[in-house]
Image: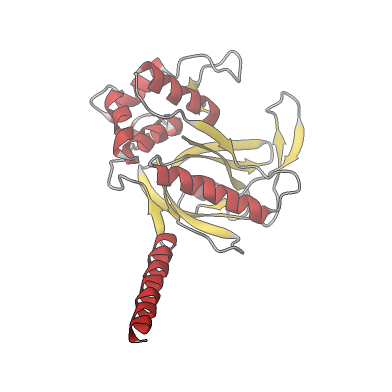
Amino acid sequence: MMNIFRLLKIISVFIMIGFSVSCTGIQGNIKAPTPNAKAVNQNTVHRNGCGISSLMNAYRFASPKWHAATAKILGSSDRAQFNFLAKNYGSVGSKYTPGTRRWESRSGISSIDLKDLANDFQNKQGLWLPSLKLTTHYIQENEPYTALLKRTHRKLRSALSSGFPPVLSIKHLAGSKIEGHIVILYEIPASIPPNATSFPIKYVDPLGGRIKSGTIRIPGNAISFVDFSSGQLKLRKSRTLSMDLPQSDIAKRYRSTGDNIVLSASIAP
């Protein structure tokens, strides 16, 4: 009889250990695999260089296998490496906006053109790396915002866990003016509560090359903005998640505290 009690006690200990390990794995944050990498400071390379600068940062802050890409970006300085990518892979014509190149000095680069630039670079340099894909984080038909928040969290967490900090496309919506900015995700919670309405993040902002804090959340009110992307004037409502980025230059410039800074898309394997 004593042996049975001892066996039950041992089993209960293993069960408790199992629960303890499981909880430890769920709690906490997931951080960029190379957290102490040197970030590219956009201010030293080009005023409209957030996209290519953030791609360089993604390779630098990623897991070791992605560092092979960093080694293939030629140049002895951040500016020289930026110019290498812009000249050799950004000067190609855009598939999406005829008559323009992927990267334009006066306007920068869109997230979808940045995805093409990255894959073109990886392929032509003979890098055995996964192709990068663009995911738009817009709400689906009849989908509640809580589901969009969870879906977005899973996607970003999965990308960062795989070893590549996802590149985030941010939009500032204000009437007829849409301003874009591109950063990379640095840290995200490993899990969020079932009833969560937001989750905190840290990101590497190429403006200054600094790690900053913010929040991705369900919007209070969908912001209306004027959309010229189709060539016709249309008034649309933002159908994505809002971002509170109090340390960002965009928020400071426009004194934005509402729902007009949104998460548009992400680039990840």
In terms of image quadrants, where is residue 96?
Answer: top right
Q: Residue at x 76, y 48 (%)?
A: 142
Outermost residue, left side: 76
Seen at 30% across and 33% down, the residue is: 67
Q: Is residue 185 visible?
A: no
| Extreme-front residue of the structure | 1
Residue 53 percent coordinates (x, y): 39, 33
Quadrant of the rendered image containing residue 40? top left
Q: Is residue 42 above or below residue 25?
A: above
Q: Residue at the spot x=39%, y=67% of the render?
A: 18
**Residue 1, position as x, y percentages in the image:** 37, 86
Q: What is the quadrant of residue 37 in the picture?
A: top left
**Above or below — where is 135 with respect to 245?**
above
Position of 135 relative to 73 (above/below): below
Q: Nearer the viewer, residue 127 or 186?
A: 127
Q: List x then y, in percent, for residue 197.
A: 60, 60
Viewer-nearest residue: 105 or 220: 220
Viewer-nearest residue: 77 or 94: 94
